[in-house]
Image (tube, grey):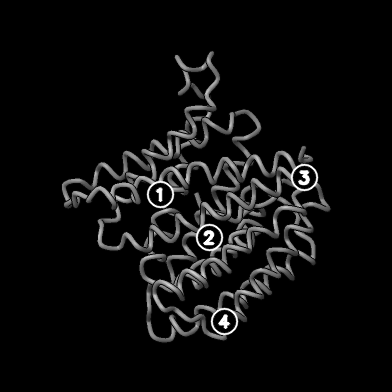
Amino acid sequence: MLSKNQLGFLYMFISVCAFSLMDLIVKWSENYPLGEVLFFRGFFGIIPLLFLIPRNRFKNFYYTRRLGLHFLRCISGLIALISIFIALRSLPLATVVSISFAAPIFTTILSIIFLREKVGRYRWLAVIVGFVGIIIITEPGLSSLNIYYIYPIIFCLGLSYVAITIRQLSKTEPVWLISLNFSLVITLAGITTIPFGWIIPSIKDLFLLTSVGILGGFANLWLSQSYRLSEVSLVTPLKYLTLIFGIIFGYTIWGEIPTLKTMLGSTLVIVSSIIIFRREILLKKQPSITRHE
């Protein structure tokens, strides 16, 4: 019989594996329109959520008194998701994963603006270290005017605002409703791109595209379950396995070899996010989100 910490550790590991596989498939799907992949992520991501809706809410599952905040959460999440999908298709896998770890840095800054939180010198130091890491990673791209390096940064900004809105929504709204509304918005956004030309997938590709939604949906649930069961400080370091998976997948499938600058920059970003997590735990705050939807 596993303890709660052990179960949480297991859920986090499975979640990391699912997210890494989803990234892999999104990068592979570059021949399919982005809107089509977005639809599969949203529509099939609803499936895991259907098991969480209480029986007494099936008739009015959509009811909420915070429609405006749900809207802001969905729009910021949609921007983040589109940005990370573009980045995954355009940049080395390890580079995108490395920059994505910077989300807690932006969350710290946005929490000052929107939640009026006080940030001490340790977290400010972490923010500075994180930004230095981002500059080191993106410098080659920015110097050669590679605009695609902007997308993972936009993702971090979008995801950071998602973290802020979820902190506010979770006080009154169930987790399944927050996730369900987001999946519905992704689905509708994907459908609107049909006139721009979708490609009918083969049976094999249909299975892979469907997996994007199912993996993403379950990965988020496993992530939440991990935090619910175990200590945040125990399971959070496992998230950095996505960088290892990104390096392995990128090298074996696309022949991508991470540069020294990418590895140095990602180390600084990871150190920065770990400092922020440790301070948030110490101050008994809700941890920042470090992973995409």
Q: Are marks 2 and 3 in contact (CB under 8 Å)?
A: no
Question: Residue shown at 72%/53% (left/top)?
Answer: 235
Q: Using residue 206 as the reference point, say whether residue 67 is left or right of it.
A: right
**Residue wearing tag 2:** 156
Return the x and y of residue 42 as percentages of the image width and height. Answer: 38, 42
Amino acid carrying mark 4 in the image: Ile
* Discs 4/3, front: 3
Q: Residues within 10 Å of mark 1 (few under 14, many from 20)?
A: many
Q: Which mark is residue 5?
A: 3
Q: Residues within 10 Å of mark 2 (few under 14, many from 20)?
A: many
Amino acid carrying mark 3 in the image: Asn
Q: Residues within 10 Å of mark 4 (few under 14, many from 20)?
A: some
**Residue wearing tag 4:** 136
Q: Which mark is residue 212?
A: 1
Say which label, 1 or 4, has the lower sequence index: 4
Q: Using residue 234 as the reference point, say whether residue 261 is left or right of it.
A: left
Residue 273: quarter of image: bottom right
Q: CA distance from mark 1 to mark 2?
A: 20 Å
